[in-house]
Image (spheres, rainbow, N blue to C red):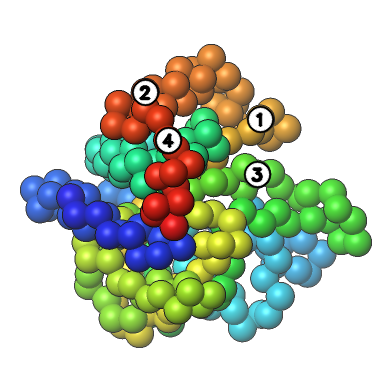
Amino acid sequence: MKIKHLGSGIVLFEDLLDQATLDAIDLNLIYSQSSEVLIEKEDGRNFLHNGHEILREEDLHNIPTRFMEKIETIPYFETLNDAVYSALVEYCKLFPVAVECVTNYAGAHFIRYTEGCEMGPHSDGSLPYEDGTVTPKSFATLGNTITASVMLNDEFTGGSVYFPTWDIEVTPKPGSALMYPSNYIGAHEVKQVTSGIRWAYLGFFCHGDRSLTTNEPFEHHVARYAWAEKLKIEVDKEFPSALNALQKKVM
């Protein structure tokens, strides 16, 4: 694994997955063992699964498809999670204070971009709100700290990840991953796929209490605490002190 800090907390992990692991990933299993997350209709308006509205009808044809249901049954699901965790440890060695803002891993899913699909500039930490209020429609992104994205194939053209604020553009090769801040600092877009199909695996490291959600795994506080403490121990093995100095050095 080669680690490249591209700037502003955007880190590329090249060869996070070795070739043997990549060869064992059968993307067709996603179709057979999961199902597409559908666009939700409400009073003639279109919404994503996380509550954000799709304002233009023409954009419905350009939105990537997400697969979230029953993905834990896919044979390589845990392999991907283990790889992402190993990248998280290295990320927190670059940014040690980040470990204080990670107590959970949530929202894991596969995402497919077919020809013509793209994603405009956005952050992975914004909440959708009820019309004319500050009442959240969904807590799906609450507390997101670090986004992890693993590229699973290269049978496509286009589809680069672009961070417009920092003018950073990257197309990770298969088996490589990007990690970056989930908030506005890491605002990004995925350029249009001009041919082929682009597959990636996404997940979010987060913190805070999501008991307002209906997702029971977020309620397992004892297990989450043990997981968070394990992460701190692994990072502290290498950097037991001087966190602020290290943070300043990286920035």
Q: Earlier in the sequence, mark 3 or mark 4?
A: 3
> Judging from the image, what secondary structure is the residue with disc 2 in?
helix
Q: Label 1 amino acid?
A: Asp
Q: Earlier in the sequence, mark 2 or mark 3?
A: 3
The outermost residue toward the top is 222
User: Can you give x and y, in whole percent of width and height, for residue 236 in the image?
Assistant: 36, 28
Q: Quadrant of the C terminus?
A: bottom left
Q: Earlier in the sequence, mark 1 or mark 4?
A: 1
Above-or-below relation of 10 to 102:
below
Spatial CA distance of label 3 from label 1 is: 9 Å
Disc marking residue 233: 2
Spatial CA distance of label 2 from label 4 is: 15 Å
Front residue of 245/160: it is 245
Residue 158: image quadrant is: bottom left
Evaluate if marks 3 and 4 touch, with contact meaning CB atoms under 8 Å apart.
Answer: no
Q: Residues within 10 Å of mark 4 (few under 14, many from 20)?
A: few
Which residue does the numbered mark 1 point to in the structure image? 209
Q: Label 4 amino acid?
A: Ala
User: Can you give x and y, in whole percent of width and height, for residue 60 in the image?
Assistant: 58, 75
Spatial CA distance of label 3 from label 4 is: 29 Å
Above-or-below relation of 94 to 103:
below
Which residue does the numbered mark 4 point to in the structure image? 242
Q: Label 2 amino acid?
A: Ile
